[in-house]
Amino acid sequence: MNLLRDILDKQALDRKRVKIGKVDGLVAELRPGKPPRIVAAELGSITLARRLGTWPGRWVARLAAWLGGKRHGEPHRIAWKKVRDRGLDIEFDIDVRETSIFDWQDWLRDHVIGRIPGA
Amino acid sequence: MKKLLEISLGIVTSVGGFLEVGSMATAAQAGATFGFRLIWAVVLGTLCIIFLVEMAGRFAAVSHHTITDGIRERFGFKVFLWPLLAALLVNFLVMSAEIGGVSISLELATGIGFQWWALPVALLAWLMLWKGTFGFIEKGVSILGLVTLCFVVGAVMLKPDWKAVAAGAVPTLPTHDAANYWFMAVSILGASISPYLFMFYSSGAIEDKWDKSYLGVNRAIAGLGMTFGGTISVGVLIVSALVLATHGIVQVDDYHQLPLMLIPIFGFWGFILFTASLAIACFGAAIEVGLQQAYLVAQGFGWTWGEDLKPREDPGFSAVYTVSLFLAAIPIMLGLDPLRLTIFSMALTAASLPLTVVPFLLLLNDKRYVGEHGNGVVSNAAVIFIIALGFVLAVVTIPLQIFGGT
């Protein structure tokens, strides 16, 4: 399998097949004397910004922490053993509601969108 | 039987969705200034959009990806950023121009200045997206959009010299105003080959759950629908060439000159038909472009999306079209001339096409996505040739238009 080709930037789903984002990054563990091993997938704007460069990464992390509190200062990380399906989309064996991935969408719904009549 | 119904519905959709402020304004300008001589640009543009729409539907039906998903996944986030930003910017300008088009038609109908209409128009368009479903929007826009067929009826009633019309379909060098001629050719190409149109079409194919059994339907819709759409544009051009020029208007630089087009043919009804066509075509396009902005962002970042969901089920998606629509109303509220904005955004669309179309073409030639349903040599060559022509002409003529003072 070609990780960068087959996993990175694919649609990510949770176990209920809710669209939770894209696989924005992959985390590899370097092991002495052995090939590196993928240990986690990362989702979110911080990971994306890091792909653009050190500075964008730092600034977006700072912005995210400022907006969402300290736990949003790091990218969302999902352990590699949670990967279930590698078909069209990548499915993770998690429930998105138990993570902080949708915090900003929840905030948007509760404070803005949900307050507009007819939502 | 069901397929036949789908094909006819799809064609109606494309006819209704094809004509928008860009194709109307550019065709009217070209007709007034250059007679039938720029018909070839409409023909080339239509040919290109036929290929692109067919590819968009085929890609969605075979790979179950929208174009946006495909580009992000295949080329990675860094490459994806370029078409994303280009499309967001061009869509913003086009949406603004469409809101301007509806506002102008309301000014024509009521006498109240167009700036005042921008916000109510954006609000109404937003309400359609907020409450409507995909099917409702698609069908509503298309059925009302059929009023634009009045331009084709008008063109036939004027009994043009069909030999001259056919001659216009063959590209010729300009005899006067060369810079203006090429700039108009670019604007026409940009107006016909709207990236939002084929990207929207691929999202629609996913919303309607297309699979390989739809490939024939797709081919029929793309071919016939876009041909009909192009025919309406040619209709506008013919009417403009025959009516405006004979009434001494050889340069359209104000929307207020345009209602005259249909009056000699239909009398007062001509005024109503023109105003209604402009309003409906632009309003439909504004809704579609607004929706496309939300599709683009939501699909690009993997959010939950779908026009059939309630806004509270996809808050990110609904926030994008809400913000986009109201932002797009601002330039018109500030009194920016809708006609100039339209022409400029069409030319810019032509210039931006390589950014969106090239990655898309590569996907359509990638066996991992489309398997045996990849592109043939003809469609690849035709699209590359037309896009390259539009790009080169745009890069040469846009600076001339801005700095040359023509």
Image: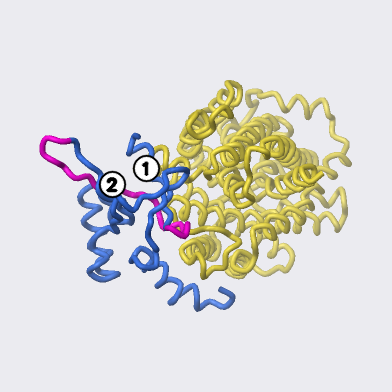
Residue B285 higher or lower than B366, as above or below: below
From where the camera sits, is residue B245 visible?
Answer: no
Residue kind at label 1, given as amino acid type: Ile
Quadrant of the drawing holding the N terminus of chain B: top right
Q: Name the chain under label 1.
A: A
Q: Nearer the viewer, residue B190 or B104?
A: B190
Q: Position of residue A113 (x, y in %)?
A: 49, 72
Is the residue B93 above or below the residue A114 in the image?
above
Q: Which mark is residue A7?
A: 1
Percent across and percent down for residue B268 are: 86, 58
Residue A21 belongs to the span the image colors magenta:
yes
Dot 1 surroundings within 10 Å: few (below 14), some, or many (20 or more)? many
Pointer 2 chain: A
> Which stretch appears magenta?
A15-34
What's the image's color scheme?
Answer: by chain
Left of A48 or right of it: where is B340? right
Residue at x 59% of width, y 67% of height: B130
Q: Chain letter for blue, please.
A: A
Q: In the figure, residue B274 lies in which quadrant?
A: bottom right
Q: Secondary structure at mark 2?
A: strand
Chain identifier matching the yellow colour in the rendered picture: B
Q: Residue at 71%, 68% (x, y): give it.
A: B111
Q: Which residue matches tag 2?
A: A26
Which quadrant of the view contains residue B172?
Answer: top right
Question: Exactly how many numbered labels are in the figure?
Answer: 2
Left or right of B68 on screen, residue B58: right
| Vertical comparison of B215 with B244: above or below | above
Foreground of the two, B234 or A60: A60
Q: Quadrant of the C terminus of chain B?
A: top right
